[in-house]
Structures are given as C-alpha cells and as structure tokens.
C-alpha cells in the first residue's frame, strides 16, 4: 500500500500488483497445469510410440522366423524329392555317371580345393562365397565349376541373382 495525501487526508492506495495478486497467482497456476498436461501428453505419446515400435519389431521377428522355417521346409522337400528321383533312377537301371564319393586322384588341385570347400559347407555354397573362400578370380572359378559340372561332380542352380553350387 502506498500512502497518498489527497486534500489533506491521507489515503492509502493499494498497488496494482496487490490488487491483482490473486489473478496473477491463478494465471501462473493455470499456466503450470497446462505445461504439466503437455509434458504428460508427450510422455504418454512417446511410450505409446515405443510400444508400437516394439510391437512392429516383434511382428517382423516372427515374420522372419516363419520365413526361415518355410525356406528350411522348402529345402527339405527339395532334398527329399532329389533323393526320390535318385531312387527312381536307380530302380530304373540308370547308372550314375560318377559314384557319390569322387576320388581325389581324378581332380586337379583347384578342383580338389573347390570340392573340399563344398564338403566343409555341407555340400552346398553360393558361387560368390566359393570365390571369396578359395581366393580365385571369377573367371577361373567359373571355368573350374563348368568343368566339374560337365563331369557330373557338381551342379549349379540359379537363385535370384546368385548361383548355388551343390556337390553331387
């Protein structure tokens, strides 16, 4: 309060802040509540977003697992069908040109290296992986694989943009 002399009478005048203190305090409280509500909204939205991301990751993981299982089943069916084909060929009297075990003495050093890599990798490998593991140039590897395929030691299958090499 500020004392003011008016016509010989001292009148105390209340300051603007004192007059409006309740309103100002109420304004700060409302502003604080608005800020708090916004922060809670952001926090809940972030946790909802994180939950959604985790759920999407779980769905993707389940999809990948199912896809891997389907691929394994398909490979298993392919292997079983090849075995069945071999059995029918044997029962029909068709003789295999090469026995399942290829003696190493009939192979050149590079061919032996390729066959040993395939044996170590469960009789199958991508051509690009063979090139990296053997350290051979693409052209040499391609020529060797062609010779081995002509002699019925291996066979190749095209899968997309890659060649899979299988040991017979």
Image (cartoon, grey):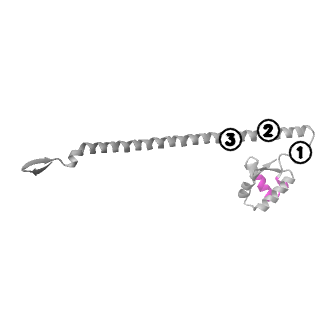
113 falls in the magenta region:
yes
Furthest residue in direction right, as rendered:
93
**Which residue is denoted by mark 2 in the rendering?**
80
Q: What segment is highlighted magenta in the picture? A: 104-116
Q: How many marks?
A: 3
Give the residue drawn at x 64%, y 40%: 63
Secondary element type, mark 3: helix
**Which residue is denoted by mark 3 in the rendering?**
67
Label ID, residue 96: 1
Q: Quadrant of residue 56?
A: top right
Secondary element type, mark 2: helix
Q: Is residue 84 left or right of residue 1?
A: right
Q: Residues within 10 Å of mark 3 (few under 14, many from 20)?
A: few
Estimate the x, y position of residue 29 in percent, counting from the top left: 31, 42
Q: Nearer the viewer, mark 3 or mark 1?
A: 3
Indicate whether 84 appears above or below 9. Answer: above
Secondary element type, mark 1: loop
Estimate the x, y position of residue 76 in percent, counting from the top left: 75, 39
- Which of disc 1 and disc 2 is earlier in sequence? 2
Q: CA distance from mark 3 to mark 2?
A: 20 Å
Q: CA distance from mark 2 to mark 1?
A: 18 Å
105 falls in the magenta region:
yes
Give the residue drawn at x 77%, y 56%: 113
Name the dominant secondary structure of the magenta segment.
Answer: helix
């Amino acid at each position: 309060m500020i004392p003011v002399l008016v016509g010989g009478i001292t009148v105390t005048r209340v300051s603007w802040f004192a007059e409006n203190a309740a309103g100002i305090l109420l304004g700060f409280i409302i502003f604080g509540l608005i800020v708090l509500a916004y922060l809670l909204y952001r926090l809940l939205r972030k946790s909802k977003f994180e939950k959604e991301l985790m759920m999407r990751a779980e769905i993707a993981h389940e999809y990948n697992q199912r896809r891997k299982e389907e691929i394994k089943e398909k490979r298993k069916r392919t292997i079983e069908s090849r075995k069945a084909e071999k059995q029918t060929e044997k029962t029909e009297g068709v003789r295999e040109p090469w026995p399942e075990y290829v003696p190493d003495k009939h192979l050149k050093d590079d061919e032996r290296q390729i066959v040993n890599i395939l044996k170590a990798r469960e009789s199958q490998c991508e051509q690009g992986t063979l090139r990296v593991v053997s350290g051979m140039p693409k052209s040499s590897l391609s020529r060797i694989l062609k010779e081995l395929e002509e002699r019925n030691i291996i066979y190749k299958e095209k899968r997309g943009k890659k060649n899979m090499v299988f040991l017979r």
